[in-house]
Image: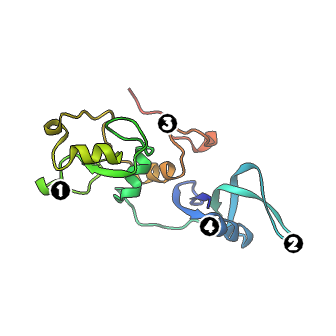
Amino acid sequence: MRETLVLNASFEPLATVALRRAVVLVMQNKAVVEQAHGGLKVRAAHVELPVPQVIRLRRYVKVPFRQRAPWSRRGVLVRDRHRCAYCGRRATTVDHIVPRSHGGGDTWLNTVAACAADNHRKADRTPAEAGMRLLVRPFEPTPADALLLALNFRDGEGLPDWLRLPAPAA
């Protein structure tokens, strides 16, 4: 099922919702479609609506400030684009750089996506102890970045110009 990015009335990313929920919000006049999937339509007896990719709420919703994106296994896989941090192949598991048995926790900076073979080979050791090298360095996404990554928008690809994040300074 397609995911749709929901923006607050002030264009801040709020959440992702299923296509069905996005259509309901638009039909109830609670949201407007800011960007649609090209050429795709949702059709009913008397209605034809573009399939929303990004919707914006008509009224501002006050939300508590979230300073950090919550950690999750799915979030780590999405952040790393389902690529193994050790070999670059398709990743299906999450590996703890410092194993939990050695005091490592479930944090953004201690976990990377890994293929089953490399996760098994590394076992209960650090990458240095296992003689393995990380191809990518783990990072902690902001809550807004986590939403965009979950929707497969990385580096602003596929986003309208008005929603793109500024490029990080080198």
**What amino acid does circle 3 point to?**
Pro
- How far, Cα to Cα, is label 4 from label 2? 28 Å
Q: Quadrant of the N terminus?
A: bottom right
Instruction: Compare marks 3 and 4 and give the one earlier in the sequence.
Output: 4
Q: Please report the residue visible at 46 percent of the width from the left and 52 percent of the height from the top.
A: 144
**What amino acid does circle 1 point to?**
Arg
Mark 4, residue position: 59
**What amino acid does circle 4 point to?**
Arg
Mark 3, residue position: 166
Residue 45 is tagged as: 2
Q: Is residue 55 left or right of residue 168?
A: right
Instruction: Compare marks 3 and 1 and give the one earlier in the sequence.
Output: 1
- How far, Cα to Cα, is label 3 from label 1? 36 Å
Q: How many marks?
A: 4
- How far, Cα to Cα, is label 1 from label 4? 44 Å
Image depth: mark 4 or mark 2 in front: 2
Quarter-of-image position of residue 87: top left
Instruction: Compare marks 1 and 4 and give the one earlier in the sequence.
Output: 4
Image depth: mark 1 or mark 4 in front: 1
Residue 100 is tagged as: 1
Q: Are marks 4 and 2 in contact (CB under 8 Å)?
A: no
The percent coordinates of residue 168 (x first, y second) are 42, 33
Residue 130 makes an appearance in the image: yes
Instruction: Compare marks 4 and 2 and give the one earlier in the sequence.
Output: 2
Q: Please report the residue visible at 36 percent of the width from the left and 45 percent of the height from the top.
A: 115
Find numbered disc 2 in the image and state the secondary structure of the residue it sits on.
Answer: loop
Instruction: Compare marks 3 and 2 and give the one earlier in the sequence.
Output: 2
Q: Quadrant of the C terminus?
A: top left
Instruction: Compare marks 1 and 2 and give the one earlier in the sequence.
Output: 2
Residue 140 makes an appearance in the image: no
The percent coordinates of residue 70 (x first, y second) are 35, 60
Q: Please report the residue visible at 64 percent of the width from the left and 42 percent of the height from the top.
A: 160
